[in-house]
Structures are given as structure tokens and as C-alpha cells.
Image (cartoon, rainbow, N blue to C red):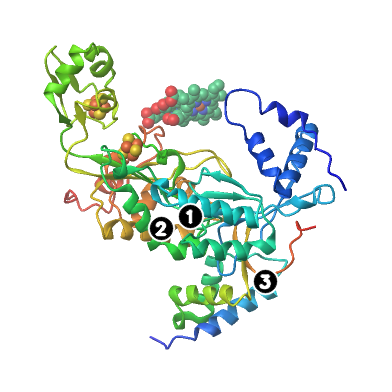
Amino acid sequence: MAKEKRKTPKLDELEKGKWPSFVKEIKTAAEKNPMAEDLLGQLERSYEEKIGHWKHGGIVGVLGYGGGVIGRYSDLPEEFPNVSHFHTLRINHPAGWFYTSDVLRKLCDIWEKHGSGLTNMHGSTGDIIFLGTRTEELEPVFKELTDIGFDLGGSGSDVRTPSCCCGKARCEWACYDTMALTYFLTMHYQDELHRPAFPYKWKFKMAGCPNDCVASIARSDMSIIGTWRDEIQMDKEAVAEYAKSGLNIQRDVVGNCPAKCMDWDGKEIKIDNKACVKCMHCINTMPKALSPGKDRGACILIGSKAPIVEGALLSSVLIPFIKLEPPYTELIDLVDRIHEVWAENGKNRERVGEFIQRVGMGNFLEAIEVEPIPQMIAHPRENPYVFYEEYYEEDGEDSDGQEEEK
Amino acid sequence: MAEQVKVEEVADAMYKMVKDSMGQKKWKATDLTKAVLELFGDRCDKALAKSAIRELIESGKCVYTYFGGSFIEIPHKEGAEN
Ligand code: HEM
Ligand code: HEM
Ligand code: SF4
Ligand code: SF4
């Protein structure tokens, strides 16, 4: 049958404009690949009818793994037989997303051979995404991927593929080696990554400084964000240069410091470092003159998530400062205690942030054996009916009148 | 402490639980772990339960599935696949 060119007037609209177009890319792939061709057809149909035509699958995967494959089927298999199966693979990306062009070609070759040829570099999870293949192709793809040193990533109720900013590889503000920690956590938690054993997903994201280029504070159950605890480093000559070149230091640097801890007398900047909240504003504005301090480490925050079962949460401070160097024993101990408590007591599909809201931060901290401290307060107390145990003990009947030892 | 049961025995017990309640209950890894700890008492621990799950999956007797969260089930043809 001579093939007539498929008409896709609605999709064609999305090729207009100066920006890249996924429609254009799918059309290019469709010249060689029948899956991509039928994908255009089903998508155009969805745009006409304003109805999605994908069904979720829940059982497909590779032997031994509980994650990495997301099952999808078309509900119009007769009309679009080449996308009747259209499973997605998540592939564990290298930390910081560094590749050689050679390995990129190999990845694409594998996918042109076994799937739609369409990739998403990278998904919002961080993984390399291979879009669209059939059930019987899963094992062959997996084999070829492992042959070139790649592995599937996480999905479902497991440790998701850890991801990070480029850190020390390209950024002088990195307060710890984000790529090294990402690699370490990926290898250390292989079992938890491939064999889902939690109430729901668990994401680690590593940012080298408070600029948080991986948006870890909004997107990860454990956000590990670089910070420092000494003074902001300053090059006074460079400060003078900025002033000379016309930067309005008073208005645009000092005036915007959220902690109001900076002073500018027209010659020198003074910073009250004890009051600095490490927002990065001054450093971002004067990168040649200011940089994070020398005593560097990270702040560990917990609990963020996007709205799925319940509303969105941002992470809040759990450990204000920790040194992060191999073998990362302190961090691993903490994570394991959290996993244990959450796995044991979390409800199905309850993220750790929601779990903390349900049981209360106080109970959570007690269970993971972390002392409460003022830095953990996310916002001022708003409920006057919350009381503290010590408050009762001092006046209560059981009190022996002695002050608790500090 | 009592002598531990064999990993195969734990895996078999888990398999039976999954099989007997097919279509009625979906088991998560933690549910299976809690169930065998109860069944075998101090002759089983979490690490052993974990090895048993691995055994079940790698032998192909059970598979991980995803329906909102991750579960452990007997392999079957899935409904969504026409
Ligand atoms: C029998 C009915 C009611 C009882 C027993 C009652 C009792 C209370 C109590 C004990 C508080 C203090 C809560 C706290 O400290 O946070 C409160 C707060 C408040 N109630 Fe009611 N209330 C009643 C009805 C209402 C009604 C009908 C309204 C509005 C039309 C209302 C408006 C408020 C407001 C605005 C506050 C917050 C006041 C503040 O803390 O500044 N209440 N109520
Ligand atoms: C419908 C009736 C009542 C309403 C709506 C009401 C509402 C309120 C509200 C809004 C407050 C302020 C709480 C705060 O923000 O701190 C309050 C405080 C208070 N109310 Fe009432 N009230 C009612 C009846 C009573 C009665 C009958 C009594 C005593 C027999 C009483 C005793 C108190 C006391 C002692 C406080 C101060 C509590 C504190 O500061 O901790 N109230 N009430
Ligand atoms: S988060 Fe900080 S360290 Fe990481 S790339 Fe961004 S600015 Fe650099
Ligand atoms: S980092 Fe932020 S809070 Fe700290 S001194 Fe600079 S502007 Fe102020």
C-alpha cells in the first residue's frame, strides 16, 4: 500500500515560531520509524477530540527490577497499531549530565533499533528518557544499555535516580562535591533504587550552594544544599572595581540583602556574617568580589513534593550544617533512620513530608533520634493549642521542682 | 535467639500469601515483611525478609507492579494490554 502522508493540521501549529518544536522532532523520527509515525496520528486525534488516548500499564518491567519502566498502551490499537504498546524507560543519567558524544550516539542507536527513537534529555526526574517501546523489546534494550555501562533508573515506591547540579565540575560556588555524593548515593542505594520497598517515592537532589540549580528544595524528599558557616570571602579590590564600573552597590546589593546585614560606606562593604542567611544575592550580583566562605558543607532539608495525592510542600531544615566528605557515614546513618521509620509507619502513597505533617515534626524527630533546634522552624507558630512537654512538666504534679538539666 | 528459617521457606510463605489473596489484596514489600516477621517470630528478621523478596522476584515467581504505589504480585497478563 502506497503510504499517503498523514495530515496533522493541529500539530503543525506547534511547528510555528522560533523555538524548538517537539512536533518537528517527531516528524523527523517518523520518516524512519513507524512508532513515531503512529504517535503523530494518535496525538493529532487527541488534539481534535481533547481526550488523551493513553492507558496506564502497571506490570511491565525487566526481570529483577521494580522500577525504570513505565507501562503505557494506546486505547486505539486498531487505528494506531505501532503505538499499541508505548512504554517509557527511565535510564540512570551520569551525575551532572556529562556525556561523550560517542556515548550519546550509542544511546540513540540502541533506541532507534528497539524503540520509537524519541528521547527526552532529560526528564524532570533527571533521568534519560526513552519514549515508546513494546513489551518484548524491554529485555533487549536493557541488555544493550548495560553492555555500554548504563542502568535503569527509579520509578514507583523506590529511591529515585539521584540528581544534582554540575557542582565542582563547573561551578566555583559548589560548597561540596555534588557529583561525587550523587554517584555515591546512587551506588549505595542500588537495592532501594531497583527494589521498591517504601510507602512511596524517595528523591535525593544535591545542590552545591543555595542557588539550588536543581530546585532540590521543591522537588526532593531530601534536599542537600551546599552552604558555609564562616565569613563570605571578599576581594576588596574587585569591590572597588564594581563601584567604579557603575554598579549601584548601596541600592542593588546592600539594599536587597534580606537579612539587612550589609553596610556600604562608599569604599568598603561590611558584612555581619552572623546575621547572613546565605541567600546568595550579594554573591550572585558581585561574583568577582564575593564568594561563599571557606568552611563549607551542606544543609539537609526534608519533605518537599509536588501535588499528587496531597498539596505541594517545600523542604524544611533538618540538619543546618553537615560536612559532606566520603565515606558520608553521618549522612547515611541519618537517611537509614528516616527510611526505617517512614517505611514502617508511612501509609501507602504517603511521601515523607506528608508523613511528618501527619505524625508531627516532634514525634518524627524523636523517632529518628534528632534533637529539635530553632533552625527547624519553618514559620512562626500559628496554633496556640500546641504545647510542649517541658511546659507541663515544670508545673505538673509529677514535677519534683527541679529544673531540667540543660 | 532461635535458629533462622531458610530464605526459601520465607519466600514460599510470602508466595502463598500473595497467591491466596490474589484479586483481593495487593501486597507491598513492607506488608510482606511484617507478615513473615509475625509468622516466623524471632526466626526471621528484616534482612532475611528482604532476601526472600529478592528471591521471589529474581526467580520470576513474582513481579513488581505499579498502581499508584509499588506492589508485589504473581505475573499475569495485564488488563490495559487489550
Ligand atoms: C459557640 C461558637 C464559638 C466558640 C465556642 C468560639 C470559640 C473561639 C475560641 C476559643 C477562639 C480562640 C481560638 C484561638 O485562640 O486560636 C476563637 C477564635 C476565633 N473565632 Fe470563634 N468561637 C465561636 C464562634 C465563632 C463565630 C460564629 C465566629 C465568626 C463569625 C468566630 C470567629 C472567630 C475568630 C475570627 C477567631 C480568631 C480570633 C483571633 O485569634 O484573633 N467564632 N473562637
Ligand atoms: C460563645 C461564647 C464565647 C466565644 C465566642 C468566645 C470566644 C473567645 C475568643 C475569640 C477568645 C480569644 C482567644 C485568643 O485569641 O486568645 C476567648 C478567650 C477566652 N475566653 Fe471565651 N468565648 C466565649 C465564651 C466564654 C466563656 C463563657 C468563658 C468563661 C466562662 C470564656 C473564657 C475565656 C477566657 C478565660 C479566654 C482567655 C483565654 C486565654 O487567653 O488563654 N469564654 N474566647
Ligand atoms: S547550585 Fe550553586 S554550586 Fe550548583 S551549579 Fe548552581 S550556583 Fe553552582
Ligand atoms: S548572602 Fe544574602 S543574606 Fe548573606 S550577606 Fe549576602 S545578601 Fe545578605
From the top left corner, tell me how far across and down residue A375 is, in percent: 28, 39
Q: In the picture provided, is A179 more to the left or to the right than A134?
A: left
Q: Amino acid at mark 3?
A: Ile
Tell me the CA gap for discs 3 and 1. Answer: 27 Å
Residue A377 visible, this angle: no
From the top left corner, tell me how far across and down residue A363 is, in percent: 38, 52
Secondary structure beneath label 3: loop
From the top left corner, tell me how far across and down residue B49 is, in percent: 49, 75
In this view, the residue in front, A156 or A153, is: A153
Q: Earlier in the sequence, mark 1 or mark 2?
A: 1
Mark in the foreground, 1 or 2 = 1
Residue B74 got which mark?
3
Q: Which residue is mark 1?
A: A92
Q: Please, which chain is the residue tagged with disc 1 on?
A: A
Which residue does the image show at 70% across and 43% down from the upper left? Answer: A30
Same chain? Circles 2 and 3: no
Which residue does the image show at 76% across and 58% down from the upper left? Answer: B81
Q: Which residue is mark 2?
A: A186
Secondary structure beneath label 2: helix
In this view, the residue in front, A31 or B22, is: A31
Q: In the picture provided, is A245 more to the left or to the right than A82?
A: left
In this rendering, the answer to whether B38 lies above or below A96 is below
